[in-house]
Image: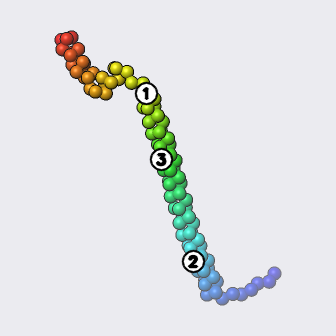
Amino acid sequence: MQAILIEQNVIEWENEKIKVNGEKKIKEMDAILKHKQELKKIDLEQKKLTLMTKDFKERATDVQLYRVTKQTQEIIQGKHTKRDEEDKKRLE
């Protein structure tokens, strides 16, 4: 077996370089992780807004295709509340 003698300060200096590089890499990995999380949030928000838009369009289509009857017109005009009050008075 052969051995090489290296001064302790050289080993400590190399170890310090390794620690600095490791800390730098950890900071970079944390930044990458944060960016990925933000991208996922943005992607989910975009999907949510897309689905909401689709839902609103479908609701608008449903309203446009809804057949309006006399009863529906009365409800829209608020006449049904007057009838309800009249019915309550009659029942009393």
Q: Is residue 4 left or right of residue 24?
A: right
Q: Which residue is located at x 60 percent, y 84 percent? A: 13
Q: Which residue is located at x 63 percent, y 82 percent? A: 14
Q: Of helix, strand and loop, which one carries label 3?
A: helix
Q: Earlier in the sequence, mark 3 or mark 2?
A: 2
Q: Of helix, strand and loop, which one carries label 2?
A: helix
State how far apart marks 3 and 1 are (Cα). Answer: 25 Å
**Residue 66: image tag:** 1
Three-letter residue code for mark 3: Leu
> How far across and how far down the image is residue 29, in percent?
57, 66
Q: Earlier in the sequence, mark 3 or mark 1?
A: 3
Closer to viewer: mark 3 or mark 1: 1
**Residue 20: image tag:** 2
Does the rendering let one see residue 42?
Answer: yes
Q: Quadrant of the N terminus?
A: bottom right
Residue ID for mark 3: 49
**Do the numbered discs 3 and 1 sit on residues whose CB atoms are within 8 Å?**
no
Q: Of helix, strand and loop, which one carries label 1?
A: loop
Vertical placement of residue 63 versus 43, above or below: above
